[in-house]
Image (cartoon, helix red, strand yellow):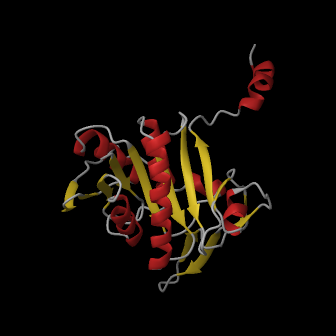
Amino acid sequence: MPSILLTNDDGVDAPGIVALHRALGEIGDVLRVAPDRDQSGAGHALTLNSPLRIRQVGEDAHAVDGTPTDCVNLGIFQLLDRRPDLVVSGINPTPNLGDDITYSGTVSAALEGTLLGVPSFAISCDGGPGRVCFQQAAGVACEVARRILRDGLPGDMLLNVNVPREASRGFRVARQGRRIYTEGVVERIDPMGRLYYWIGGVAPEWRDDPSSDYAALKAGHVSLTPLRIDLTQESVLAELASRWEP
Ligand SMILES: [Mg+2]
C-alpha cells in the first residue's frame, strides 16, 4: 500500500479532512497530521520561535499545535518511518483560487510536500460545510491520488484542485486566476467604543478569464492548476539585468 501523509489547515477534526481520510484509506496507508486548531490563512508559515507538541488523537491521527507547514515537516521527519509516496492537503470547505492561494494553509502544505520531494496536491471544494460536498470532493481526491501514485507529477510543481458544488463536468486544467482587489477591510466599533478591524470580510471578485481556475469551477469543472515552486518572473530577467547590472 502506498504511504499517504494527509494534512489540512482547518484542524485535525474538521469534517473535510475526516471525509478525506476515510476515502484515501481505500487506496493507501494514511497518516493524518494536522493542526490542533483552525489555521486557515496561515499561508506557508513555519513555527521557529516556540516548541511544537504532537498529540495523538487517533490510531493514525496526530494533532500539532502549529501550522500546516509544521505538520508536513513533523509527519515526514518525525512520525513516518519512510518518506511518503504522496502528500494530500484538504478538503478545504471553500475554494482556493487565483491570488488567494498565497494565503492558503491548504495549498501551502502541498507546497511544502513538493519542496520536501514528495508529489503533493491540495484539494478544496465550493459549498460550505455540507456533507455532500465533502463526499464528492473526497471521491475526486481519490481519483487524483490514484493517478499521481500511478503516473507521478512533473518535478517542481504541485497540483491545486478545486471541486464545484454541483455534479462535476470533469477535470479542466486551468491557470491561476487574478483577483480584483476591492475594499478588503471592515471597520467596526466594539462594545467599549473602540475601533476594530476585520480583514477579508468582503467576498472576492475575479477577473473575467475563461482559462482561469475561477472560470473552470464556475462552469462546473474540477479545476486542476499546476503551481510552480520557482516564483522568478523569467520574462523580465534580461531586461532588469540590462538596466540594473553595471
Ligand atoms: Mg481552511
Residue 202 placement: quadrant: bottom right
Nearest the camera: 223 or 144? 144
Nearest the camera: 148 or 67? 148
Residue 56 position within the rendered picture, expressed as x and y whole percent measured from the top left: 19, 59
Residue 219 placement: quadrant: bottom right
Residue 194 position within the rendered picture, expressed as x and y whole percent measured from the top left: 52, 78
Give the residue at x 80% y 19%: 242
Q: Residue placed farthest to the top in the image?
A: 246
64 is higher (above) or lower (below) than 151: below
From the viewer's perspective, tell me whether residue 154 is left or right of residue 183. Answer: left
Q: Residue placed farthest to the bottom in the image?
A: 191
Residue 68 position within the rendered picture, expressed as x and y whole percent measured from the top left: 39, 53
Give the residue at x 74% y 17%: 245
From the viewer's perspective, tell me whether residue 235 is left or right of residue 153. Answer: right
Please tell me how many numbered marks the rendered image carries: 0
Give the residue at x 74% y 26%: 237
- Confirm whether residue 43 shows in the render: no
Nearest the camera: 46 or 8? 8
Quadrant containing the C terminus is top right
From the viewer's perspective, tell me whether residue 150 is left or right of residue 222. Answer: left
129 is higher (above) or lower (below) than 22: below
- Confirm whether residue 110 shows in the render: yes
73 is higher (above) or lower (below) than 223: above
Nearest the camera: 114 or 230? 114
